[in-house]
Amino acid sequence: MTFFTVVARGLIRRPVRTGLTVLGISVGIAAVVALVGISRGFSKSWETGMKARGTDVVISNMGSSLIPKPFSASVIDRIAHLPHVAATCGILVDLISVENAQMIMVSAREWGGFSWNNLKLISGRMPHDATEPAVLLGRTAANVLNKKVGDKIQIETGELSVIGIVDGNAWVENGSIILALPLFQEITGNLGKINIVDLRVNPSTSAKDVQRLCEQINSLVPEGRAVVAGEHITDSEAYRMAQAMSWGTSLLAVLVGVLGVMNTMLMTVFERTQEICILLALGWKRGRIIRMVLWESAMLGLLGGVAGVLIGSVGVRILGRTPSIRGLLEPDLSTGLLAVSVAIAVAVGVVSGLYPAWRSSRLVPSRALQS
Amino acid sequence: MSENIGAEKTEEHAEKSKSERGFSDPTSNHLSGPATTLDTKTGPSLPYLFEAVGIAKKFEDGQVHALRGVNLRVMAGEFIAVTGPSGCGKTTLLQMLGALDRPTKGTLLYRGNSIPDLRDPWRYRALEIGFIFQAFHLLPTFTALENVQIPMFENHLSAAERKDRAVGLLKSVGLKNRLDHFPAKLSGGERQRVAIARSLANSPSVLLADEPTGNLDSENAHLILELIARLHHEQNMTLVLVTHDIGIAQRASRIIQMKDGRIVTDSESIIVRK
Ligand SMILES: Nc1ncnc2c1ncn2[C@@H]1O[C@H](COP(=O)(O)OP(=O)(O)O)[C@@H](O)[C@H]1O
Ligand SMILES: [Mg+2]
């Protein structure tokens, strides 16, 4: 028998209570994994999408909505001549409901812009010109919409043909409907409007020059903000709010976990007052009693953390497969996030055990042993 | 129940750890805090294992005066029976001797060291004292074998050594076939034998037994008493035994009668049987 036998015996003596406590923590940790994983996944998806389109700088007005506000396409004329600018591409994106998909990304691109270049055809062909009433579907989008080349697709008031299925090398790209800009402008009544300008700089441009370019653009284009591609999404107020909400909710869940474990450990200590007094009477150091209680509560945290990470990952995967979310974002379930979540759970356990441990170490051994 | 209780291994182990404990040298303050306040003019307290001068115990909750000035000197190797009506303070006295609680007044020394001022009371409880309770006080979620190992955590023994030692102790109290039984599956007599084995875990110098047969039928009471008496004379342990049973008390080398928190009679030399 080792010290850990004693710790384990403390946990299994009340299996139901231990199980419920572990479940309580695991729900909290699952919430952390799901919420943070989704919000991080969202930003990661955007970033990789940006990279896939070959963008260095993004000009948009993220405001407080998930989709940037439209502005006049003439903005491009104001910035195209700036130093270091290699190419620009006006884009109009929207999240709309298309046929059976509740929410799907539609990405309308300036015909001939570089954003078309990274799309690899899986089947079908590219449009002939900007006026052909046709769309490309990202591979996931095709899957979600259940379309193949040659099918018709109803986007708002317009009926278009699916002429190609593409791989865009990123989650967002694959989940999108891609078409020529004028078509979508007409369908949505946004004539002459775009809401994103993708901008590519000359290959030799330094990071400092890119920064300076952004500043220049910002003074020339009050309608939007120029941001280096990787920072694009985190610049969005909506994203920040989602991030804050997911951490806030997680914190709440963790707090509930702390209270749950503390309650359990206090019950354990009270109910085992006599046994703790016996341990003291037999010569156990107070430090050992404290360690016993802390290890027990840390183990509750660890078990809850592992269970929570499992529940959270599975839950997020299932959520990611539902039609309304599929193709919109790829949850970030990096080992980093999972490890942090388990660490949080263990910390919850240890912190919750501090007070009960202190209580238990204050017991006078004679108290419970009057016989 | 057979042979020598606690085997030679126990003896040898006791030898070693005793010197480590630093109780044998009363001039060393290794274990005590600031020097104890016993009047030094009365001479060194060396010959006595325990020396209590005017110890009183008052419990905070209520006006209970459990002890009202107890004076007691105990030599190493004595077998003392403590008797007296219920509520007279016998358990409280034993708890003071075992450092389970501290007196409110008076001086209490163990080998010249003040017990309430011990820097490491756990070390004293673990290594010097073996406690046997009327209610056994075994831990219900541990087997007999595990219960006996509980006090050994504060000793420098490996897990394997702890187990071996516990097996040896349980064999010596005749529970070779009950090693993996939980307390609930043991009879009262068997439980008390496990508790006795546990009290011997670290080869203590002193056994404090608080009505150890109080919860047992007469046959088991007899067996337990034999066991404890044998421990006393085979291992030369100091034994302080609280009992209501005058028959048991008469086997002691000395009988102390208590009343109302005081010692009323102390027969220093009744040796009925050797
Ligand atoms: N923890 C305690 N708090 C208050 N009173 C106590 C406590 N322990 C014992 N007492 C009281 O102290 C007196 C002596 O108790 P005790 O030493 O257990 O007597 P005995 O063992 O001789 O029956 C009793 O009146 C008892 O009620
Ligand atoms: Mg009593």
Image: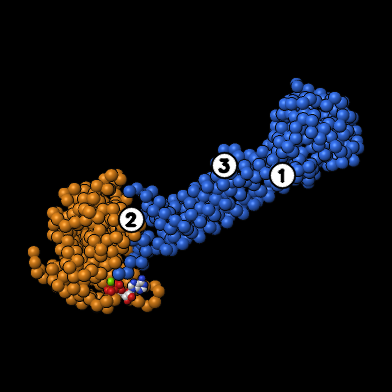
Q: Is residue A189 left or right of residue B102?
A: right
Q: List the residue tagged with mark 1.
A: A324
Label 3 SS: helix
Q: Quadrant of residue A81?
A: top right
**Residue type at numbered disc 3:** Leu
From the image, which quarter does the N terminus of chain B lie in?
A: bottom left
Frontmost residue, A190 versus B137: A190
Q: List the residue tagged with mark 2.
A: B142
Residue sitting at x 87%, y 41%? A157
Ligand 1 falls in which quarter?
bottom left
Mark 1 CB lies closer than 8 A to ligand 1: no
Where in the figure is residue B247, as x and y percent of width and height? 14, 72
Residue B178 visible? The answer is yes
Picture colour for chain A:
blue
Numbered disc in front, either 1 or 2: 1
Chain that bears disc 3: A
From the image, which quarter does the C terminus of chain B lie in?
A: bottom left
**Residue type at numbered disc 1:** Ser
Both marks 1 and 3 on one chain = yes
Label 3 crowd (10 A; few <14 / some 14-19 / many >=20): many
Q: Are marks 2 and 3 in contact (CB under 8 Å)?
A: no
Numbered disc in front, either 1 or 3: 1
